């Protein structure tokens, strides 16, 4: 006789535990939704078709005739008693699909096989109803857009600003503001944002990393890769890092056993209520943005940010946006296209509100240096429970949250209401924010002091930064040249006056020597190497100016400087001495081998007659004698 084995303690409940695990194939929310649909149909059948009901329950398996009645019931809108609304309004395709799934769920739970004809009816009706609903859209009986409308970027900023401007119930508005910003930046459903815990948040490089355990369409956690959330110091009202910092540092002490949820219990319901009340109280502003209150919901943020980034020229690729939002790419794409950190970082940086086509897109978050500035005791003082309540992963992000508070301290003081809890928090009262201000670093693309490098940067952004630096450099050079050229006439006059004795006639050689010295001095400042040789002509100034990217101004400056502003020098004996007795057009200098421009009068007498006319224009060099005084 075989000897029986002793059952270990606790193993007797293995059957119940297995049933619980099997039940997890459908989440509780979906199960509750199916039960609600079946209950409503049963109530309607009890009144209209009681032959399909036995002992208050639906007769299984569902017959073909009963299935058709149920599908007709689900295709039109009805009141709570099951009566059809007048005029008739049709439900969306998703409602009919939901009924199909609920009927299959009931059969599977009861262990009853679905009649093949009934299954085919369900499948064919859904396929035909899709075309029916498309025809209703074409005839204008139902709206073309299905579900909530996508929220625009301006609408998103409006709601964020409204939450910041609250004068009462600050705890609700602080939580709603941070919830709103994370929903937008993560492209998350409200239920996914409400499930974020402190353990899911960390900091890596220059961004927050947030992970979901599960999502609505990913109950197995296969898409739980980190989502990167970036700071936006350029626009603080929509900066998710600053908003999270205000939430954390105003929350107060967290006792052991407190919920580790980032937004606490029932955060989805609280946020939905806040959104509905805010839209109702600001209806005129909502309408001015081209939206209706009925079109705005928690799903509007998810649609809005995805639409905004998809339509942004030079923005992230569509596949990266879909992966971040958790949308399915189909059977083939889902097996061959996977998430990469670079793509998600690009999407996260664009979602935070930074301009993709600007050098500021590579803006770094406010951060401290590589040395510890806050002691453990100070951390406990400004953030109670720092070492006991918050997990190590979240503690890696707290210094960056504090740096964001320090950097935006003045902005917070100007923007928030005087009764805001932040002004009563330990971190604000400690005076540490003012002390740490000199130790906060920013930067674009790379900060050499802290060695922090921006991530998620497309190749064209560094080019924007280089072009911006070049533009600033050229602007400074242009300003310096304009200031220098404006002083040239005065410098020439001063130089001539200082070198010519009073009441003495000015000799031509002295004037030529003075201009020569001035040209050499000017060229030595504009072109450090090589210096101008003393025997060379000062008219090489035009070549120097051309070498510093002022080709289009060269002829105008020479003509205005030497022909209009200083045509003659007046001596002390009322004598007029011409500066340039010989002028030429279209000539060639045999000394330097340079051509003389056709639009510029150029001096030729200093080359000892070596400037000869062009062969095609032999008569263009003409001496111009000084006019005799009458």
Image (tube, rainbow, N blue to C red):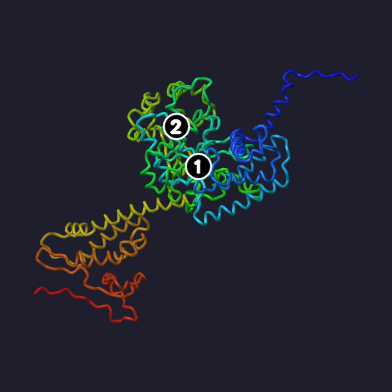
Q: Position of residue 130 (x, y in %)?
A: 59, 52
Q: Residue furthest right?
A: 1
Q: Residue 434's spot in the image, x, y percent?
A: 36, 29
On the image, numbered disc 2 is attached to which residue?
175
Which residue sits at x=40%, y=51%?
468
Question: For the N terminus, which image quadrant?
Answer: top right
Q: How far is disc 1 from disc 2 in space, using C-alphas?
A: 18 Å
Q: Nearer the viewer, residue 370 or 562?
A: 370
**Secondary structure under the numbered disc 1 in the rendered image:** helix
Above-or-below relation of 522 to 48 = below
Q: From this viewpoint, is residue 556 visible?
A: yes
The label number, if any, that marks residue 299 in the structure image: 1
Q: Using the image, determine if residue 621 lies above or below residue 405.
A: below
> Is 112 situated above or below 384?
below
**Left or right side of 364 for 411:** left
Q: Position of residue 161 (x, y in %)?
A: 38, 39
């Amino acid at each position: 006789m075989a000897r029986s084995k002793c059952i270990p303690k606790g193993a007797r409940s293995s059957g119940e535990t297995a049933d619980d695990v099997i039940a997890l194939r459908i989440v509780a929310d979906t199960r509750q939704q199916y039960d609600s649909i079946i209950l409503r149909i049963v109530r309607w059948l009890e009144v209209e078709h009681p032959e399909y009901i036995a002992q208050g329950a639906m007769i299984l398996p569902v017959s073909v005739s009963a299935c058709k009645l149920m599908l007709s019931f689900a295709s039109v809108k009805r009141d709570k008693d099951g009566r059809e609304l007048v005029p008739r309004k049709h439900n969306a395709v998703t409602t009919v699909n939901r009924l199909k799934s609920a009927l299959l769920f009931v059969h599977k739970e009861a262990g009853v096989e679905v009649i093949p004809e009934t299954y085919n009816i369900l499948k064919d009706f859904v396929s035909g109803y899709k075309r029916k609903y498309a025809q209703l859209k074409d005839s204008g009986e139902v709206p073309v857009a299905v579900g909530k409308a996508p929220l625009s970027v301006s609408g998103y900023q409006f709601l964020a600003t409204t939450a910041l401007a609250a004068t009462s119930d600050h705890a609700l508005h602080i939580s709603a503001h941070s919830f709103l910003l994370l929903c937008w930046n993560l492209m998350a459903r409200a239920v996914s944002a409400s499930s974020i815990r402190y353990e899911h948040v960390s900091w890596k490089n220059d961004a927050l990393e947030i992970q979901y355990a599960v999502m609505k369409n990913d109950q197995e956690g296969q898409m739980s890769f980190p989502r990167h959330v970036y700071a936006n110091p350029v626009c603080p009202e929509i900066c998710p890092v600053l908003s999270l910092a205000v939430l954390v540092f105003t929350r107060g002490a967290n006792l052991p056993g407190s919920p580790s949820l980032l937004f606490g219990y029932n955060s989805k319901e609280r946020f939905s209520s806040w959104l509905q009340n805010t839209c109702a109280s600001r209806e005129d502003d909502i309408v001015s943005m081209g939206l209706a209150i009925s079109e705005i919901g928690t799903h509007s943020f998810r649609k809005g940010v995805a639409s905004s980034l998809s339509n942004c020229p030079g923005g992230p690729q569509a596949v990266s946006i879909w992966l971040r939002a958790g949308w399915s790419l189909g059977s083939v794409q889902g097996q061959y296209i996977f998430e990469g950190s670079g793509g998600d970082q690009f999407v996260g940086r664009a979602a935070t509100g930074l301009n993709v086509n600007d050098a500021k897109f590579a803006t770094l978050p406010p951060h401290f240096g590589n040395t510890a500035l806050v002691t453990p005791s100070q951390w406990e003082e400004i953030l109670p429970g720092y070492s006991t309540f918050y997990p190590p992963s979240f503690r890696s992000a707290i210094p960056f949250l504090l740096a964001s508070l320090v950097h935006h301290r003045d902005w917070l003081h100007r923007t928030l209401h005087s009764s805001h809890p932040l002004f009563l928090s330990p971190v604000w009262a400690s005076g540490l924010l003012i002390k740490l201000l000199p130790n906060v670093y920013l930067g674009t693309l790379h900060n050499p002091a802290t060695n922090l490098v921006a991530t998620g940067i497309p190749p064209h952004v560094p080019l924007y930064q280089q072009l911006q630096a070049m533009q600033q450099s050229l602007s400074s050079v242009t300003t310096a040249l304009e200031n220098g050229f404006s002083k040239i006439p005065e410098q020439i006059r001063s130089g001539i006056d200082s070198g010519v004795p009073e009441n003495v006639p000015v000799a031509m050689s002295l004037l030529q020597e003075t201009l020569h010295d001035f040209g050499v001095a000017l060229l030595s400042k504009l072109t450090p190497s090589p210096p101008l040789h003393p025997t060379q002509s000062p008219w090489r100034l035009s070549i120097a100016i051309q070498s510093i990217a002022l080709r289009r101004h060269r002829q105008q400056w020479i003509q205005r400087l030497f022909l209009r502003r200083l045509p003659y020098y007046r001596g002390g004996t009322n004598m007029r001495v011409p500066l340039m007795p010989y002028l030429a057009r279209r000539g060639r200098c045999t000394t330097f081998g340079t051509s003389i421009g056709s639009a510029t009068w150029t001096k030729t007498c200093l080359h000892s007659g070596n400037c000869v006319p062009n062969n095609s224009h032999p008569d263009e060099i003409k001496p111009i004698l000084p006019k005799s005084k009458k």
